[in-house]
Image (cartoon, rainbow, N blue to C red):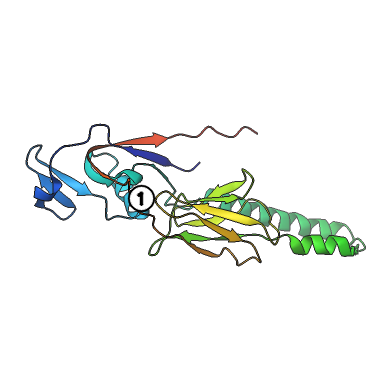
Amino acid sequence: MREQFNLEIKEPCKENFNQFEKTDKGGFCGSCEKEVVDFTGMNTKEIITYFKQNDTEKTCGRLANIQLTTYGGNTKPKRRNYVAKMGFACLSLFGASTLQAQVSKPTPVIEVKSPEKQIKQQQQIKVKGVVSDSNDPLPGANVLLQGTSIGVETDFDGKFTFPKLLKKGDVLVVSFIGCESKKIVIKDDITASNISLDIKLKNDTHILMGSVDVKKVYSSKKTK
C-alpha cells in the first residue's frame, strides 16, 4: 500500500510574510516566534521529502492553495516481492531439473498461430513511462485511458506502468494538480515514455500561511 498524506491549513495566519526576517527555509515570524517554511518555490518531490523527514515536528508554512492536496509515494523500493519471486524462480528451476532427471523429455508441441491471432498480439502495446514538469518528475500524477475509469498513478519518481495492454489509437489523459492536462495518442510502446506537463497558473491561485496539518490517508485493503 502506498503511504499518502494530505496537507491542510485550517486557520490562515494574517501576518505579512514579506516583513519577516529571512531564514534559510523561509522567514521568522516575530509574533509567534517560529520559522515559517516557504513551500511556494518547492516542487512536489521536495514537499514530500520535507514532510517525510519532519513528520514528528509541527510545521508553520506558506503554500499556494493548489499545493494543499494529497501527496503519495514510497521512497523505498519494495524488495520483499522481488526476493519472493527470485526464490520461486530458483525453486521452479530446481524442480524442473529434478523432474528432467526422472522423466524423459516430452515431445515439444509447436503452436501454429493464425493470422488473426498474430495481428491481435501485434496490436497489444505495453505502455510505461515517466511524467514530469519542466524540471522534475511528478509523483501522484494520474494517467487515465480516455472514456474509461482504467488508470494508474505515478510513483515517487514519476514512473508508471499502465495496467492494461493498449492498442494503436488509444488515448491516455495525463493530469496533475496545478498543471495543464495532456492527451497522448498511442502509436507504439515508446509513445508515452516521457511525458512533460506544463505548469498552469490559475487566476484564482492564492497563498495561505499558517500551521500545516499533515494527515495520513489510509486506503482499504483489497479483498482477495
Q: Which residue is mark 1?
A: 202
Q: Is residue 163 above or below residue 122?
A: above
Q: Secondary structure at mark 1?
A: loop
Q: Is residue 205 above or below residue 113?
A: above
The one nearer the camera, 18 or 97, is 18
Q: Residue 148: x and y, percent?
A: 64, 45
Q: Residue 138: x and y, percent?
A: 43, 55
**Residue sitting at the far right:** 107
**Residue sitting at the far front:** 203
Give the tally of numbered discs: 1
Q: Residue 188: x and y, percent?
A: 66, 66
Q: Is residue 46 left or right of residue 58?
A: right
Tell me the quadrant of the picture where the C terminus can be found: top right
Q: Is residue 191 above or below residue 103?
A: below
Q: Residue drawn 39% across and 64% down?
A: 134
Choose top left, top right, bottom left or bottom right for residue 111.
Answer: bottom right
The one nearer the camera, 196 or 125, is 196
Q: Is residue 16 left or right of residue 118?
A: left
Density class for disc 1 (Cα within 10 Å; few <14, some 14-19, many ≥20) is few
The one nearer the camera, 18 or 96, is 18
Q: Residue 197: x and y, percent?
A: 45, 59
Q: Residue drawn 34% across and 55% down?
A: 43
Q: Residue drawn 27% across and 55% down?
A: 41
The three-letter code of the residue at mark 1 reads: Lys
Choose top left, top right, bottom left or bottom right for residue 11.
Answer: top left
Q: Decide if residue 113 is in sight here.
A: no
Q: Decide if residue 199 is in sight here.
A: yes
